[in-house]
Image (cartoon, rainbow, N blue to C red):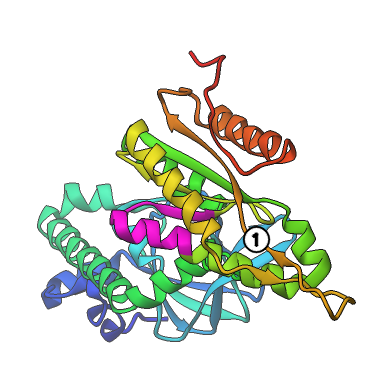
Amino acid sequence: MNIDPQSIQKQDLYKNLSKEEIDYIILHSEILNLSKNKVLFSSGDNASRFYILTSGDIRVFRKKDRGEEEMARFTSGDTIGDFDFARGARYDADAEAVKDSQLIVFPSKGFSIDSMILEKPDIACKIKMNAIIMMTARIKSTNRLVLDNMSWVQNLHRRAYEDAGTGLWKQTIIKDEIIENLKKPAALIMVKPDRFKKLVDTNGHSAGDEAMIKIALILKNFTRIMGHGWALRFKSNETGLIFDNCGEEQTVSIARSLERDIAAMESVPLNSSNAKRTDYFHFTATISWTIYPSDGADWDNLFAGNYASLLDNWKSGGERIVHYINTEKS
């Protein structure tokens, strides 16, 4: 079967080639008939050939531990593997025929790009230039797509790390994004409301949720005032702040202000069966703070130690501010 020159000329990789140069490409191309379920290429193979699908369907997929993930499906008129071919890369996925398919393949068996460079360096140079233009255009297109959807990307990113109940950052963001970008010294301040179980047991979980939202607003206000930092929820009702470029004196000031702001929260009347008497829940908090790396050079150990300090002091009665120092610091 003869190869239609139009199928070659309209490909980006062969733009601006003369008739004689197109004839040369056709001379070193071949027709590939691929039966249903037959493999076109496999992950890890060198992308040394360029495919134009003239009929049928080809699917590209990645193999997973439990099944497969289809990446793309190509139909008549589509090109396959052109980007990998242009880069001289290896395929990172598998491709197979969904049904009986026919493709134009360049170069044909027994021929290669290196052969063309030796035989027709002018044509090879044009194809390489087209490949660079093609890759640049695709990169720009991808960047434009990201920029056009930046608000959506940012929203998705925030939702992945945001605690739904309070709007605070989840603890997972620390290792994923915060720690590697911290400017030292950095303050880690942890907070746990005192006697919180009494509020929840008496007035219900909704009262606890409402209180946590108010505490979250206090924490967020500190990051707003400072102009940087992260307000986080660590576990159930343990929250806190991380500030980079924050030394001991400033951290102590933040901790004291935080203690005052939580104590200033409006007291909550406790549900009681005694109609003649109303008891109130008054907010206080236990706060443990530490400075990285002066109080501990290993972040994970410092974090765990500060958290243990928070719980120990909370169990001992709470309503205090403590400074945690890792005595085993290097």
Q: Give the range drawn in magenta.
A: 218-232
Residue that badge 1 annotates: 282
Residue 151 within the magenta-colored segment of the rendering: no
Camera-nearest residue between 295 and 184: 295
Residue 249: image x %, image y %? Answer: 34, 33
In the picture, measured across the screen, residue 235 lies left or right of residue 51, that is: right
Tell me if residue 161 comes above or below residue 299 in the rendering.
below
- Circle 1 packing at 10 Å, graded few (<14), some (14-19), many (20+), is some
Q: Residue furthest front?
A: 276
Camera-nearest residue between 44 and 252: 252
In the picture, measured across the screen, residue 158 lies left or right of residue 28, that is: right
Q: Which residue is drawn at 72% across and 57% down?
A: 196
Residue 92 visible in the shown view:
no
Quadrant of residue 126 within the rendered picture: bottom left
Residue 221 within the magenta-colored segment of the rendering: yes
Which amino acid is tagged 1? His
Q: Which residue is drawn at 54% across and 28% down?
A: 324
Kind of element beneath mark 1: loop
Q: Main secondary structure of the magenta part?
A: helix
In the picture, measured across the screen, residue 209 lies left or right of residue 30, that is: right
Residue 117: image x %, image y %? Answer: 19, 50
How many labels were placed on the picture?
1
